[in-house]
Image (cartoon, rainbow, N blue to C red):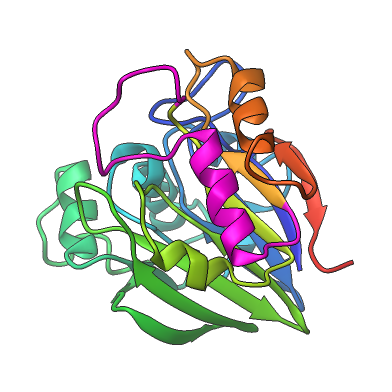
Amino acid sequence: MRLTIIGSSGSFPGPDSPASCYLLEADGFRLLLDLGNGALGTLQRHIDIYSVDAVYLSHLHADHCFDLCSYWVARMYHPEGMKSRIPVYGPGGVALRAAEAYGLDPDPGMTEVFDFRELTPGRLRIGPFDARVEHVNHPVEAFGIRLEQGGSAMAYSGDTGACDALVELAADTDLFLCEAAFQDHREHPKDMHLTGSEAGEYATRARARSLLLTHLVPWNDDEITLAEARSTYAGPIGLARSGQVHVIGS
């Protein structure tokens, strides 16, 4: 599996990164994990955007899904004709949310180019990936995901506060892509995001072989977040940056 960081900025795009978006490739299949605001432009630096095979939306906050609106325009109104439908996996109501975001009537909404599939906890197959999704702890319905292919495994937390499901999703993975929007020295709302030290704790409990911190809010000092995570996790660790490529399981 090959993971390219398209956007890793938390809550809103930063000066060097769009909001959350990650390109996962295997066996010629291209899956987008989230499509936050600003991501579609940066994605074009890496691939032909019409070569995407499926989109997974962890939840329906703007910084994880709103560039689906731009992508709808690109697929719907291409000068050579409307592009074929691709699956879009997301929480309940994802098709309606997408239509409302662009001011479309719900019927057909965006269904002419997107085949919306609502997630429920459990296992599913997405292209070559064996996937498992579970609810995580966020103010709206949100999912974390585990993806396995060819003997390798990764997990992506999405947005979450403290949540034991993360341990199961990330258990013995080669890479745990985990949000770390908060920092220990600041007051913050409960049940919304993790600190770096909490991300490290979950990676340790899960025995993840490496940890990549993401959803990094532009007003934070990322080096503090990294230091917090290192205080609770002893394995290889890094900060997700737009443009990075990670070969998983190599």
Q: Nearer the viewer, residue 206 or 245?
A: 206
- Residue found at the very far right of the displayed protein: 250
Residue drawn at 52 percent across, 57 percent down: 33
Q: Decide if residue 3 is on the left or right side of residue 197.
A: right
- Residue 72 horizontal/vertical position (percent): 38, 52
Q: Nearer the viewer, residue 28 or 180?
A: 180
Q: Decide if residue 235 is on the left or right side of residue 132.
A: right
Q: Main secondary structure of the magenta part?
A: loop
Queried whether the magenta region covers residue 207, the answer comes back as yes
- Residue 157 horizontal/vertical position (percent): 48, 55
The quarter holding residue 156 reads bottom right
Residue drawn at 74 percent across, 65 percent down: 174
Q: Which quadrant holds the N terminus?
A: bottom right
Magenta residues span 183-210
Q: Nearer the viewer, residue 205 or 138?
A: 205
Q: Decide if residue 17 is on the left or right side of residue 168.
A: right
Residue drawn at 47 percent across, 34 percent down: 195
Residue drawn at 68 percent across, 50 percent down: 211
- Residue 11 horizontal/vertical position (percent): 38, 30
The correct choice, above or below, for 208 with respect to 159 in the image is: below
The correct choice, above or below, for 139 with respect to 170 in the image is: above
Queried whether the magenta region covers residue 204, the answer comes back as yes
